[in-house]
Amino acid sequence: MERYARGEDRVFEQLYGLLAPRLHRFCMRLAPSVAEADDCFQETFLKLHRARATYVTGANPLHWAFAIARSVYLSRLRYWRRRPEHLGATRDVAEAGELQIHDATPESEVSAQHLHDTLASELSRMSEKNRIAYVLLKEEHLSAREAAAVLGTTVEVVKQRAHRAYQSLRAALSTAGWSEYGNPV
Amino acid sequence: MATPSERLYPRIRAAVEATPASTTRTHTRILAALALVPALTAIVVLIASEVVYKQPAAGLHIDVSSGIAMLTVVGLLAVLAVASTIFALWQGRDGLGIGSVSLMSIAALVVPVYGALTVAQPLHSGAADNIALTGVAISPWGLRCLFVATVVSVPALVILAAALHGAAAVSSRLRGAALGAAAGAWGGFAVFVFCPSGNLQHLLVGHVLPIAVFTVIGAVALTRTLRP
């Protein structure tokens, strides 16, 4: 990222290869539909390119990219709220994920997919703030301090939001007939 | 099968190639801003004071009750302006700036701190408000000071916004408010050095109000400029 920030355009492909998979997954968690997640991802990369001179040497480029992605998403959200007639997005992100399970029985595959769908569906339903705090801490494995920096808030608030998200996930799993540890009740 | 990010790569690559991007690093722009804003303040104060009162830094010479108090307040106001500017511009190790609580503190505290230093116990006795002392009529509404503060704060705000253009991915509204407060603090510092008035109404309207106004302007007008 440091080389790209200095103006070395040829390292873009390498940078993209390093950032894109996790950044796209993060956009999938932010956006309500796959199309919206793709748009958010593309716009994030374009903004990252435009803002490359603002990158601080030594900073984690992925965390910086997460912050830009969230800023892009919130801008898009504000845009859509001003134009509610264009809001036609379906919440298909929850259905988009498919588990890659090898050497498993058909029963366990169905069971795991059901568990995954329950979690993804509940994540897409909860508030953006709680969802992103949870995603950054539990899926992207950022520390609470790093997540707080990405979200522009305090460590305590991030922990509180992630805890709320965790509780609603637990409630959703329980309603769907799963225990907290992923076993059918 | 291509992953979603692999599928989108050609389109993103084409868009990136077609989009120009500055390579002037933000820390370079910040350093330039930190040099330009005080220089601009000094130039405006010296010119305005010379034009109006026929002497440089009239606020530090005319009707000053105590030299030590004057030096202390000038020093504290300079610290307020410099510190609020540095913290508002600070990018931090992660490039995401200081936290939202700190930004909110800057935006909320600059006006009361400035007011406490200059209005609670004015440095000037108020004798200069009499035209007989300076030969200059000082409006109780502080219109001249409002103008001087604006002449300093507007370019200061533009310079600070240019320094952080596209660099605040997080808390951009609060960052804008903090930059507005910092620009206002430079305007407040300028009018303190420029103006010898001790009139309470004049101080509130001409000296303190512009800082509050620029804090609000920063929060409202800079958000888009600061976002990547």
Image: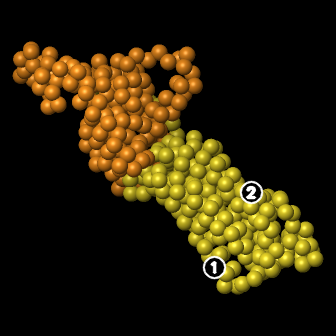
User: Percent from the top left, x then y, of residue B45?
Assistant: 75, 69
On the image, the x and y values in percent for residue A5 come to 42, 49
Q: Which chain is yellow?
A: B
Chain coloured orange: A
Q: Is residue A149 visible?
A: no
Query: Could you say which disc has been placed on residue A77 in the image?
Result: none
Q: What residue is disc 1 on?
A: B72
Q: Is residue A34 above or below residue A150?
A: above
Instruction: Tell which subunit mark 2 falls on.
Output: B
Viewer-nearest residue: A64 or B204 = B204
Closer to us: B196 or B148: B196
Q: Is residue A42 above or below residue B200?
A: above
Q: Is residue A99 above or below residue B211?
A: above
Helix, strand or loop status at disc 1: helix
Residue A34 in percent (x, y) is at: 37, 21
Say whether residue A35 is visible.
yes
In the rendered view, would you say B19 is above or below B157? above
Q: Amino acid at mark 2?
A: Thr
Q: CA distance from mark 2 to mark 1?
A: 25 Å
According to the picture, the residue beneath numbered tag 2 turns out to be: B150
> Horizontal and vertical percent for residue B130?
90, 73
Query: Quadrant of residue B72 in the image?
Result: bottom right
Label 2 vs 1, first from the N-terminus: 1
The front one of B12 and B77 is: B77
* Circle 2 SS class: helix
Please report the residue visible at 29 percent of the width from the left and 30 percent of the height from the top. A168
Residue at the (49%, 29%) spot, across then down: A77
